[in-house]
Amino acid sequence: RSDFDFEAAELRDKQVLSFPKDEITGMRISASGKETVLTRKEVEPAEKEDAQKEDPSPRRIVWADGQGREADKPEVDAFLSVLSDLDCEGFIEGLSKDQAGAPVLTVTLTGRSDYTLSFHPARDGKTPGTSSASDYVFVLPDYRKESIDKSVANLTGKK
């Protein structure tokens, strides 16, 4: 009985977003009517003073906005790590993507295809989320949502 006695919600796949982190070349964060766009670029490393070194230095990866200001690469990497294999806590039954309302935060990642994650106005103390990889409205665990909010604030300069 313990092997087969499950509710449908317990058997449901809770992964709502998945992509290879190395594939992402751009991100667009839209929150509070403002938009931040970051693009991944490879740049030549600074010239070394040691001219005897014959090994060419590897190219350095940076994330920069439209004005050329570099974003904090460890913060971007951590943000992509959280999003690259995102599991939800559960789904909101009876609420479709159309009924969730206008998003208050949308993150669009560009790679081989576009990956979108949106959060909508809170309902009953829970923040509904939608994703391009899921047909259903979901709720993230509080710690995961707080981590995303913190990264968005750091990357957009709104602390």
Image (tube, rainbow, N blue to C red):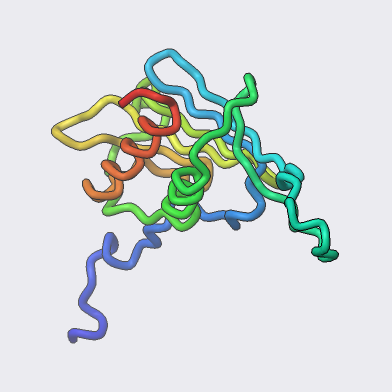
Q: Is residue 148 above or below residue 23?
A: above
Q: Is residue 50 left or right of residue 6?
A: right
Q: Quadrant of the N terminus?
A: bottom left
Could you say which is closer to the camera, residue 112 or residue 60? 60
- Residue drawn at (46%, 38%) of the image: 117
- Residue 141: horizontal and vertical position, in percent? 25, 50
Q: Is residue 88 above or below residue 117?
A: below
Could you say which is closer to the camera, residue 13 or residue 44? 44
- Residue 33: horizontal and vertical position, in percent? 43, 13
- Residue 36: horizontal and vertical position, in percent? 52, 23
Q: Choose top left, top right, bottom left or bottom right for residue 148.
A: top left
- Residue 58: horizontal and vertical position, in percent? 74, 57
Could you say which is closer to the camera, residue 95 or residue 49? 49
Could you say which is closer to the camera, residue 48 or residue 98? 48
- Residue drawn at (44%, 51%) of the image: 78
Q: Choose top left, top right, bottom left or bottom right for residue 139.
A: top left
Q: Is residue 125 left or right of residue 51?
A: left
Q: Is residue 104 left or right of residue 81?
A: left
Q: Is residue 88 above or below residue 157?
A: below
